[in-house]
Amino acid sequence: MKTHSKVPFLPLGSPMNPPKNSSVFANKVAKVGLCLIAGLFTVYVIGTTASIGPDYSPIPVEQANSNDTITICKEYYNDTRQYIQDRPRSDYEDLPTIYFVTPTYPRREQMPELIRLGHTLMHVPKIHWIVADDVYQCNVHLDSLLMEFGIPFTHISSPMNNIYRHLKNVPRGVANRRAALNWIKSNNKSEGVLYFGDDDNTFHLRLFSEIRHTKVVSMFPVGLIGNYAVSSPVVREGKVIGFLDSWIAGREWAVDMAGFAVNLEYLFRYKNQVTMPYKAGYEEDMFLRSLNLRLEEVEPKASNCTEILVYHTQTKKTKSPDIILPHSITLSSPSKSNIAHLFRFMENSGVSHFTSSKGVKPEVSYKGKKLPVASVY
């Protein structure tokens, strides 16, 4: 067997043919080797710090701010619910308002998710729902849906900048939550409670009663998270002393986005510095750090974090199908049946898309026989 020993930084010779002054040669080798090791260690430390360090962001926060695009699509402040949980709405007038922030994005499950969440929030008094959509143009059909629930809401168009869409770990939902924070600060909503609730999460109604009176920052377990199926504060004698989470990754605040609520009066003390950076996996940690939060200030909820009142449920995501319509008909064509109206609804809600080229050809049946969809138009 032949072996080869390459020492590219030794131009003077090789182990098989060393220079005459071997002691000097050995000292040089040792010094160069130590320098290389030190250099590699420095690169490793810098790389590790860049990946998990608290101050790291792919783009500086100041630059990211200038790249945020925010459009207020619709604001609705009337609460048209007469009764909430079998009590008149007027019974709840003195309660603090919960500002419930939901980032969302176009997909075929978007409308069903928001319908389900909306029907949960219909049972929550004194709530303002901020729905921030990852689109460049306002979705008027989303406006119509939000109006149906009868609760106050703000609909925002807040697309993530394209510079982040090509990252290996895309910071989803950050642009939407930043837009909501911007709306809260610019509208001086300094009273009440802020909570981030994704459109695919599941919430127990008790959660809202518990977080409503948050004094600084409250925290609680979130189910169906990571390898432990839970992310939770560790509580001893009524105080939070650490965190149970299967992904620590150097985070001071190893919590899920759905696992905390913030008092807005407290948030406004740090109005000019509070932010959420575009750093996938570190959004919660760096947001809470920007509030200068101390561990002893955290208020454990859910019976000292022994119960789960919110679950990180996730709907299976499937690509919206492309459905081929015959060249003779379009979505606006007059129809003798319900099909044209149904197809238009599906298109508007993002459930499916219609095309005249590639996709699946729709068929209907009559007495067990397949017929082209054009036959019932």
Image (spheres, rainbow, N blue to C red):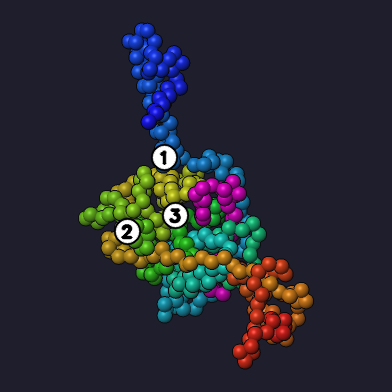
- Residue of label 2: 228
- Residue sitting at 71 percent across and 74 percent down? 325
- Residue of label 3: 264
- Residue situated furthest right in the rendering: 328
On residue 146, the disc is: none
- Residue sitting at 51 percent across and 54 percent down? 172
Label 3 vs label 1, nearer the camera? 1
- Residue of label 1: 53
Question: Residue flagged by tag 1: what amino acid is it?
Answer: Gly
Quadrant of image for the N terminus: top left
Question: Residue flagged by tag 2: what amino acid is it?
Answer: Tyr
Vertical order, 171 against 108 (above or below): above
- Residue situated furthest left in the rendering: 237
Tell which circle, 3 or 2, labels the residue nearer the N-terminal end: 2
**Boundaries of the magenta span:** 146-174
* Residue contact between numbered discs 3 and 1, judged by CB atoms under 8 Å: no
SS type, badge 3 = helix
Separation of marks 1 and 2 at Cα, in angstroms: 24 Å
- Residue sitting at 72 percent across and 69 percent down? 356
- Residue sitting at 21 percent across and 55 percent down? 237
Separation of marks 3 and 1 at Cα, in angstroms: 27 Å
Task: Give the quadrant of residue 212.
Answer: bottom left
Image position, residue 39 (x, y; %): 41, 26
Image position, residue 167 (x, y; %): 54, 47
